[in-house]
Amino acid sequence: MTSVGLLYPGHSAEDDYPRIAVLLDSDIRLPIFHTDIGEDAHRVDALMEMGSPARLAAGVEELRLAGAETLMWACTSGSFVRGWDGAHEQTRELAEAAGLPASSTSFAFAHAAQALGIGRVAVAATYPQDITASFAGFLRAAGIEVSATRASGIVTAAEVGTWGREQVLELARAGDHPDAEAVLLPDTALHTVAHLAELEEALGKTVLTANQVTVWEGLRLADRRVWAEGMGTLFARPEDREWVPA
């Protein structure tokens, strides 16, 4: 049994995680603690507060008692908004508080792309333009080239959580770029897990989404490698990965 503890801000698309657990069909547990989101706004000051040490520390002990072996801050904007160094400091503080290996969804995107040998990506974001640009800057700091960005201008996670299949597919298509080896959908408030296979089929390339990479990163920290159908290229066996760059 491997248990990845998830600190998830508020309530939007956390039902992606039980779906992932079913698709993995393995001895994986994904206990969730919902952190206090504060003001629901994709705005720098609100996102800085949402990812503050006090808000994150609130769920650490509960997840430890739930048997978590690794800890994930299941939020992208609440980490990359702090910049490369600030995001590292955030996860270091979380690891120290938990006494466990810890990471965040922002680093999960960087590590997943690197693991797949992907060097050029397009970003299809629900965020406003300035927040989208901040994520692109974070990826560049990780050594990943950003070929294009698409900002949808959505301010609240609550609204993002209402998006369905057609909106998710349209976002991915609109954000794609011919030079990109993969398309990244960075918001953990966006329901994407049910659409992973369809997204990759529609775009003909790897698609990485926030809740998908969050679980992958938590398992990576626990030294677990898991293959699963329906979870996209990231969880496909190497011989079955159609879209990975040669």
Image: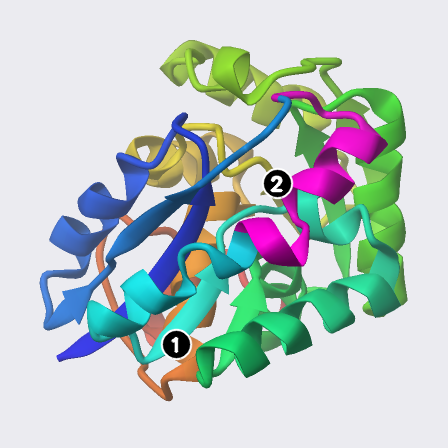
Instruction: Name the one closer to the observer, 160 or 125.
Output: 160
What residue is shown with label 1?
70
Q: Is residue 216 left or right of residue 91?
A: left
43 is within the stretch colored magenta: yes
Q: Is residue 207 left or right of residue 119?
A: left
Residue 137 in the image: state x and y as whole percent.
89, 51
How packed mark 1 is, by other alpha carbons closer than 10 Å (few <14, some 14-19, many 20 or more), is: many
Which amino acid does the dot numbered 2 rest on? Pro
The residue located at (43%, 79%) in the rendering is 220
The disc, 1 or 2, on the residue closer to the chain's N-terminal end is 1
Instruction: Name the one closer to the observer, 115 or 105.
Output: 105
Q: On screen, 108 above or below 232? A: below
Instruction: Name the one closer to the observer, 121 or 71.
Output: 71
Q: CA distance from mark 1 to mark 2?
A: 21 Å
Which amino acid does the dot numbered 1 rest on? Thr
Residue 82 disc label: none
The residue located at (34%, 49%) in the rendering is 33
Q: On screen, 198 above or below 56? A: above
Q: Nearer the viewer, mark 1 or mark 2?
A: 1
The residue located at (22%, 55%) in the rendering is 229
Q: Which residues are magenta?
A: 40-55
Q: Quadrant of the C terminus?
A: bottom right
What residue is shown with label 2?
186
Where is residue 140, by image quadrant? bottom right
Residue 172 in the image: state x and y as whole percent.
59, 27
Instruction: Name the one closer to the observer, 155 or 46.
Output: 46
The residue located at (12%, 51%) in the rendering is 22
**Label 1 secondary element:** strand
Q: On screen, 209 above or below 156? A: below
Residue 42 in the image: state x and y as whole percent.
72, 25
